Image (cartoon, helix red, strand yellow):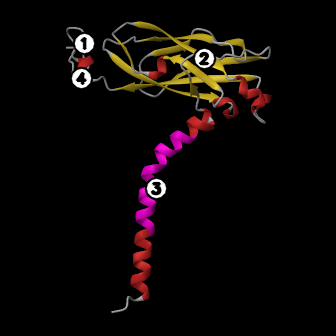
Amino acid sequence: MAMTPQKKTGFLLLGVAATMLSLSFAAVPFYDWFCRVTGFGGTTSVAAEGSDLVLDRTVLVRFDASKEAGMPWDFKPQQHSMRIRIGETGLAFYEAHNPTAETVAGTASYNVTPDSAGGYFTKIDCFCFQMQVLAPGETAIMPVSFYVDPEMVKDREGKFVREITLSYTFHRTEIPAEQAALAPAGEDAASGAVN
């Protein structure tokens, strides 16, 4: 029995929908990989150690801090900018303070502008690599060590970059059960609320 044109079209559309759904699940990891490889969207690189090559050319690195709505911490850079040579390892510090009466966890997302510098801004170590947990009233000084890859001066857009801004945004994060169990006496481990 032959299939009608309407049924063929229906099966074709069903196949297209199934393909699109499959691709949507692959899009997030692919986009993450693409951003890390190309620096697209200000995504930075990560290295185990500093650069072997340091150029005479300098770049001004500015530091920015913000919080998502509902994040109760005070969060700021300890320095607003620094001038470093391209390839030189820089060390900057951010400060976070929990003014509340409860333990609060946070995770920092980051961005580098201009986008053309993102793939060349390389972090060696950063507080953003892991969740931060601050007890009531606690203040933490958090370092980030980095360098600007000398390959940037060979990039058709990167070679014009004279200033780079490193921005962090802290987001409130659920405290893992094992850390919540270690909360100071008087706090409800499940909710973080003071009794």
Q: At numbered mark 1, what does the secondary structure look like: helix, strand or loop?
A: loop
| Residue drawn at point x = 35 percent, y = 18 percent | 104
Q: Which residue is rendered at x = 25% and y = 12% of the image?
A: 183
Left or right, 104 with respect to 53, comes to: left
Q: Confirm or deny contact between disc 4 and disc 2 (CB under 8 A).
A: no
Tell me which label, 4 or 1, sits earlier in the chain.
Answer: 4
Mark 2 or mark 1: name the one nearer the start of the chain: 2
In this view, 11 is above or below 39? below
Assign the magenta stretch its main secondary structure. helix
Q: Which residue is mark 4?
A: 177
Mark 3 vs mark 4: which is more N-terminal? 3
Mark nearest the camera among 3 and 4 is 3
Query: Is residue 52 shown left or right of residue 98?
Result: right
Q: Are marks 2 and 3 in contact (CB under 8 Å)?
A: no
- In three-dimensional space, the C-alpha distance between marks 2 and 3, rounded to whole angstroms, equals 35 Å
Q: Earlier in the sequence, mark 4 or mark 2?
A: 2
